[in-house]
Image (cartoon, rainbow, N blue to C red):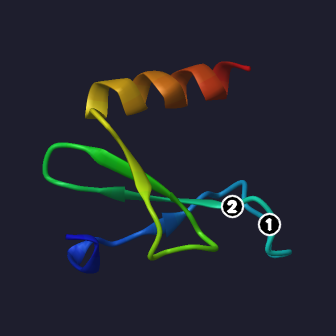
Amino acid sequence: MSGDLVWFKSSHSGGEGGNCIEVAEAAESVLVRDSKDNSGPHLAFSPAAWRSFVEFAQAI
């Protein structure tokens, strides 16, 4: 499944190779993974849960 996905690096990730995440939209979920381990595991969130997280993060 992850071979068909388009992953985007967080806009807050620096170019230093530190703590970065990537996000991809799947059919019914939003996936998040560690950009340094793109073959490793990922977290899956419902679109509503991801939207709530983004809104919360923007508010702080």
Q: Mark 2 highlights which residue?
A: 20
Which quadrant holds residue 57? top right
Apparent side of residue 38 relative to residue 59 in the rendered image (left or right): left
Residue in view at x 36 percent, y 51 percent: 31
> Compared to 27, does 35 lie above or below?
below
Q: Residues within 10 Å of mark 2 (few under 14, many from 20)?
A: some
Q: Are marks 1 and 2 in contact (CB under 8 Å)?
A: yes
Q: What residue type is labelled 1?
A: Gly
In the displayed image of the protein, which residue is found farthest to the right? 16
What residue is rendered at 72% in x and 54% in y? Answer: 12
* Mark 1, secondary structure of its residue: loop
Residue most extreme to the left: 27
In the image, is 7 to the left or to the right of 2? Answer: right
Residue 54 image offset from top left, x and y in percent: 52, 31
Q: In this view, does 38 lie above or below 27?
A: below
Disc sitting over residue 14 in the figure: 1
Check disc 1: other Cα within 10 Å, few if <14, some if 14-19, many if 20+.
few
Between residues 60 and 40, which one lies in front from this camera angle? Answer: 40
Quadrant containing the C terminus is top right
Residue lying furthest front: 40
* Circle 2: residue type: Cys
From the image, which quarter does the N terminus lie in?
bottom left
